[in-house]
Image (spheres, helix red, strand yellow):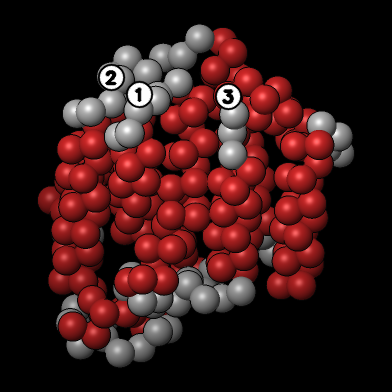
Amino acid sequence: FMPRKRRDAMYAVYAFCREVDDIADGDEEVPVKLARLSHWRQEIDRIYDGAPTLPTARALVGPVREFALAREDFLAMVAGMEMDVQGTMRAPSLPELAVYCDRVAGAAGLLSIKVFGAEGPHAAPFAIALGRALQCTNILRDLDEDAAMGRVYLPREILRKHGITSSDPESILAHSALPAVCAEFAEVAAGHFAAAQRELAGCPGRALRPAVVMMMIYRRLLERMRRTGW
């Protein structure tokens, strides 16, 4: 859906997101992961100085200049990965989860809309809302996979409302109230999709076609999980 220059820039942004995510999800010890993420913080500074050392960072130099990609959005992504590595994402509070979603998904959305060429007052709110919606859908999709890494992103307020007081991922997944928790959290995701749809009405439609495609696919995924009962 994009011309070559924007497409290549999007590949570079995705490669960065994939690389720091792989660090967080890898098998290395926590201090090693944190050191590698800290190195990426330094590498982000080098991107803006025009002298990065890592291949993915070198691929970002052109897009950063061409599309005015913000340093703070790259740093937010790293901060989100650090939250994963530090083990804080085990039944987080709703405010903690919002911070996490905005770092790992909202930041990616803000980088993406600049590459897409979307401008105007509704573009950034759209990116944040859609990022939250996609991340909440991912959380519901990946419960088993996340639990295997010692994580559960379902918010503690909803868990406790349905009688789940443990923060142990395997205990939560085995609890009989889990489907009810998922159904309520799906409403949170649906609310973010609705907010994104409202903001989209004030955005340039052609520029945001790739984002609209993602939104449609993920909405269908959320509905399919609802129908199949989690």
| Separation of residues labelled 1 and 3 (CA atoms) | 15 Å
| Separation of residues labelled 2 and 3 (CA atoms) | 18 Å
| Residue 67 image label | 3
Which sits earlier in the primary sequence, circle 2 or circle 3? 3
Q: For mark 2, give the secondary structure.
A: loop
Q: Which residue is mark 2?
A: 205
Q: Quadrant of residue 124?
A: top left
| Residues marked 2 and 1 touching at CB (< 8 Å) | yes
The one nearer the camera, 152 or 77, is 77
Q: At which x and y percent is residue 90?
A: 45, 77
Q: At which x and y percent is residue 108?
A: 49, 42
Q: Which residue is mark 1?
A: 208
Which sits earlier in the primary sequence, circle 1 or circle 3? 3
**Which amino acid is tagged 2?**
Gly
- Tally of numbered discs: 3
Q: For mark 3, give the secondary structure.
A: helix
The one nearer the camera, 96 or 162, is 96
User: Would you say residue 216 is visible in this rendering?
Assistant: no
Q: Residue at x 55, y 60 (%)?
A: 80
